[in-house]
Image (tube, helix red, strand yellow):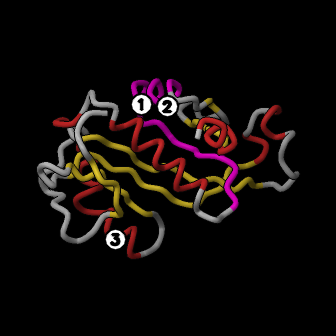
Amino acid sequence: MTGRFRLVALAPDHDRAAFDCGSDPLDKYLREQASQDMRRRTSVCYVAIDEATNAIAGYYTLAASSVPLTDLSEAMAKKLPRYPLVPVARVGRLAVSVAFQKRQLGAALLWDAGLRAMQSGMGVFALVVDAKDKTAASFYKHHGFVSFSSNPLAYVLPIATLAKTK
C-alpha cells in the first residue's frame, strides 16, 4: 500500500462530502447514514484518512451479526457447537475513493476489519460479507473468503484463518 493512512472511527469533523468511490449508494451511505448507524450502535464505520490531505481515502463498516449454522459448509460446521446461529462480524460496506484505488487500500481495510473482529473481546467465528456484485465477489475470494448459504454473493472467512496469517 502506498501513502500513509490512519484508520480511525468516523468522527463528525471528517469531510465526507468529497468522498467518491464510484458507487452512488456507497458514497451516499458515508455522507448520510454512517453517523446515524454509529449513534444507534448498529454498526461502526472506520475510515482511512490520508495523512497528506486529511481526506477520507476509504471506509468500511463492522457490525455484530449471526448466520445459521446450516448455511455453513459441512467442514466449517463440524468444528462448531450445534447452536442454530453462529456469531460473526459482518463487514457491511467497504469502499475506496477513486483517488486512492489501485493502492491495496481495500485489502488493508479488510485486514483491519479482521483484526478488529479478532481483538474485539467478543466471540465471533468469522467475518462475513455480502458482495454487491461479481467484481466485489472476486475481491473477497482473492482474500480467502469462500461462498456460503444459498446467496451466491455471501462470503465467509473464519477468524482462525486470519489468526494463522497474523
Q: Is tag 3's residue or tag 2's residue first in the polypeptide sequence? A: 3
The first of marks 3 and 1 along the sequence is 3
The answer to whether any part of residue 124 appears in the image is yes
Mark sitting on residue 136: 1
**Which amino acid does the dot numbered 3 rest on?**
Gln
Q: Is residue 98 above or below residue 51?
A: above
Which residues make up the magenta segment?
Answer: 123-142
Callout 3 environment at 10 Å: few (<14), some (14 to 19), or many (20+)? few
Q: Which residue is mark 3?
A: 36
Quadrant hosting residue 144: top right
Q: Is disc 2 placed on a helix, strand or loop?
A: helix
The quadrant of the image that shows the N terminus is top left
Please determine whether, in this image, residue 21 is positioned above or below residue 14. above
Q: Amino acid at mark 2?
A: Tyr
State the residue position of label 2. Answer: 140
Q: Does 125 sit left or right of 18 as displayed?
A: right
